[in-house]
């Protein structure tokens, strides 16, 4: 039951709702069409983008906490991963959701805060240098299970981190192709790549 709750919490399309309620924008039809905080930032402005990001992070933290309360670290990991699956493939939007970065970040902030701090810094530095949001997301995703293994040395946490990495990389496959071709949009050039 708690795993189903984690999925349903993750599936709440906050980015879509923030865009619709605060800016009268359907993010599915604007920008990249992605139902995520970066596209809200791109299409509805900074305040809406930050609100969407905060809510997407919260829907990673809360299910992981719920799993921890109900069954300890293993269940917290399962609930966190399932929440990210809900975000990426939400039943409320015909299974077409975001890319899982902010929600994965929320899961990691709760489960592995020391690693999360490093990953947030890596994300911010990568975006600051490259001005490509997706590159920062992918860099943090790829390094995630390595940092968790080094700091926490828990196979359960490493496995959860690895699954989150697979989800984020899979959802960024079009971005990866654009990066390979040198065509991924950059911050400050009329679009926010994400």
Image (cartoon, helix red, strand yellow):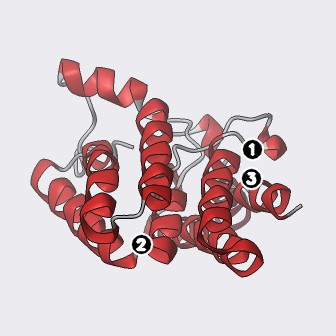
Please state which of residues 19 and 104 is positioned toward the viewer in this rendering.
104
Determine the secondary structure under disc 2: loop
- On the rendered image, what quadrant is the N terminus found in? bottom right
Please state which of residues 193 and 135 is positioned toward the viewer in this rendering.
135
Q: Position of residue 140 (x, y in %)?
A: 29, 53
Question: Could you give the CA–CA distance between mark 2 and mark 3, rounded to whole angstroms?
Answer: 22 Å
In percent of the image, x 74 and y 44: which residue is there?
90
Q: Earlier in the sequence, mark 3 or mark 1?
A: 3
Task: Pick out the residue farthest to the bottom.
Answer: 69
Mark 2 residue crowding within 10 angstroms, few (<14) / some (14–19) / many (20+): many
Q: Earlier in the sequence, mark 2 or mark 3?
A: 3
Task: Pick out the residue farthest to the left.
Answer: 129
Q: Earlier in the sequence, mark 1 or mark 2?
A: 1
Report if the CB atoms under discs 1 and 2 are less than 8 Å apart.
Answer: no
In percent of the image, x 58 and y 44: which residue is there?
98
Question: Could you give the CA–CA distance between mark 1 and mark 2, rounded to whole angstroms?
Answer: 25 Å
Report if the CB atoms under discs 3 and 1 are less than 8 Å apart.
Answer: yes
Residue highlighted by disc 2: 112
Residue 11 marker: 3
Mark 3 residue crowding within 10 angstroms, few (<14) / some (14–19) / many (20+): many
Camera-nearest label, 1 or 2: 2
* Left or right of 146 on screen, residue 17: right
Residue 90 marker: 1
Determine the secondary structure under disc 3: loop
Q: Position of residue 183 (x, y in %)?
A: 23, 25
Q: Position of residue 116 (x, y in %)?
A: 35, 70
Report if the CB atoms under discs 2 and 3 are less than 8 Å apart.
Answer: no
In percent of the image, x 75 and y 61: which residue is there?
6
Q: Reply above or below: 58 against 34.
A: below
In percent of the image, x 32 and y 55: which residue is there?
144
Determine the secondary structure under disc 1: loop
Q: In which image quadrant can residue 181 be found?
A: top left
């Amino acid at each position: 039951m708690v795993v189903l709750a984690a999925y349903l919490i993750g599936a709440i399309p906050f980015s879509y709702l923030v865009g619709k309620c605060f800016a009268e924008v359907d993010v599915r039809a604007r920008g990249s069409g992605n139902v995520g905080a970066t596209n809200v930032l791109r299409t509805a402005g900074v305040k809406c983008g930050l609100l969407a990001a905060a809510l997407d992070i919260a829907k990673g933290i809360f299910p992981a906490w719920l799993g921890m309360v109900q069954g300890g670290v293993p269940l917290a990991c399962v609930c966190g991963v399932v929440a990210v699956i809900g975000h990426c493939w939400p039943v409320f939007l015909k299974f077409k959701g975001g890319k899982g970065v902010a929600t994965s970040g929320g899961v990691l902030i709760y489960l592995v805060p020391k690693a999360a701090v490093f990953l947030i810094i890596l994300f911010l530095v990568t975006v600051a240098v490259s001005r490509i949001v997706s590159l920062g997301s992918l860099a943090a995703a790829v390094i995630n299970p390595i940092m968790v293994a080094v700091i926490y040395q828990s196979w359960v946490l490493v496995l959860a981190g690895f699954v989150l990495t697979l989800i984020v990389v899979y959802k960024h496959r079009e971005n990866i192709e654009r990066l390979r071709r040198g065509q991924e949009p950059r911050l400050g050039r009329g679009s926010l790549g994400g």
